[in-house]
Amino acid sequence: MKLKLTLFLNLAFSSLLFAQQEQLTFTYQNINFSAAPRTTINPMSIKMWDNYNNGGPTAYGTVMEFYGLTAHQTGQFYFAGWDNSKIRYREAFYAQNTWSDWMTLLDSKNNVESTGRLMITGQGNHYINGGNVGIGTTNPGDMLTVAGKIGACEIKVSTSAGADFVFEPGYEISDLKTLEKFVKAHKHLPEIPTAKEMVENGVNLGELNIKLLQKVEELTLHLIEKDKQIDNQNTKVNDLESRLARQEKMLSEMLRKMK
């Protein structure tokens, strides 16, 4: 009895090893992508399909389908070499009777596609090229190029310079008459790009803000100087008014004595 049991176990084990070296062969069937989930496969099964110009993500491909417990999870993997060998996946969860949209699995060869919270959509509008990230453009010239509007609560621009040099004792500021001639001739402030240059080359926010701050500080110096001039003029006016008042008083005294 023990000999028969041993021979049986050896035979079964040998058969198992032999079976592991074999391949699983499926009968050829062209998949029907419009079929509802779980209608073309039995529970607890794996099935291979061929797609020969019968719809689907590409004209031709191979589908591996799996199905768990009755009415439970089912899914399909789609393999195709017609679009850079992308691998796609769709599923129907417990009691769901319709397929989800095809999802492209992440790989190192194809573009990243995601349906989660990190979403990259569009045809070539979001691009990473040589470490540069482009949004709305496929040709990012900087580390981040955005061809559109940016919404933000706060933007911090790092800089290595400022405009406090305007208040240094040796700083020479042009007089207002010279500034007036320049503005009339060039239609912009000195050291500030023209409107045409801004349109053609864009604006460096950090550099432009420093230049604008420089002009504000120069304007502050002009205001301080004008304030000094006004104070000086007020002093002279007050002095003239005092002298005029004294003269009027003297004149009144002379007229009174003549009477």
Image: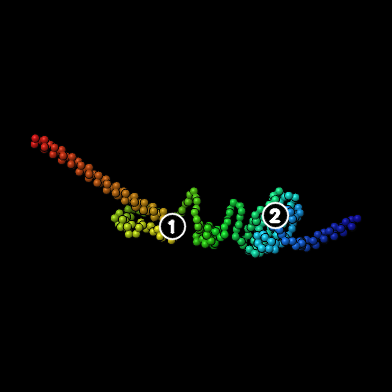
> Could you classify mark 2 by the number of other residues whose Cα lies within 10 Å: few (under 14), some (14-19), or many (20 or more)?
some
182 sits to left or right of 198: left
Q: Which is nearer the eye, 18 or 94?
A: 94
228 sits to left or right of 29: left
Give the Cα separation between the discs numbered 1 and 2: 52 Å
Residue 87 seen anywhere in this rendered image of the structure: no
Residue furthest to the left in view is 258
**Residue 179 picture location, percent across and down:** 31, 56
Q: Quadrant of the C terminus?
A: top left
Residue 48 seen anywhere in this rendered image of the structure: yes
**Quarter-of-image position of residue 247:** top left
| Image point (48%, 49%), residue name | 154
**Residue 143 picture location, percent across and down:** 51, 59
**Quarter-of-image position of residue 106:** bottom right
For numbered disc 1, what is the local secondary structure?
loop
Residues at marks 1 and 2 touching, judged by CB atoms closer than 8 Å? no
Which dot marks residue 234?
A: none
Q: Which is nearer the eye, 241 or 183?
A: 183
Q: Tell me the amino acid under the disc marked 1.
A: Val
Query: Which residue is identified by label 2?
Result: 75
| Image point (18%, 41%), residue name | 244
| Image point (69%, 56%), residue name | 34
Q: Tell me the amino acid under the disc marked 2.
A: Gly
Query: Which residue is identified by label 1?
Result: 203
> Could you classify mark 1 by the number of other residues whose Cα lies within 10 Å: few (under 14), some (14-19), or many (20 or more)?
few
Q: Earlier in the sequence, mark 1 or mark 2?
A: 2
Q: Which marked residue is nearer to the observer: mark 1 or mark 2?
A: 2
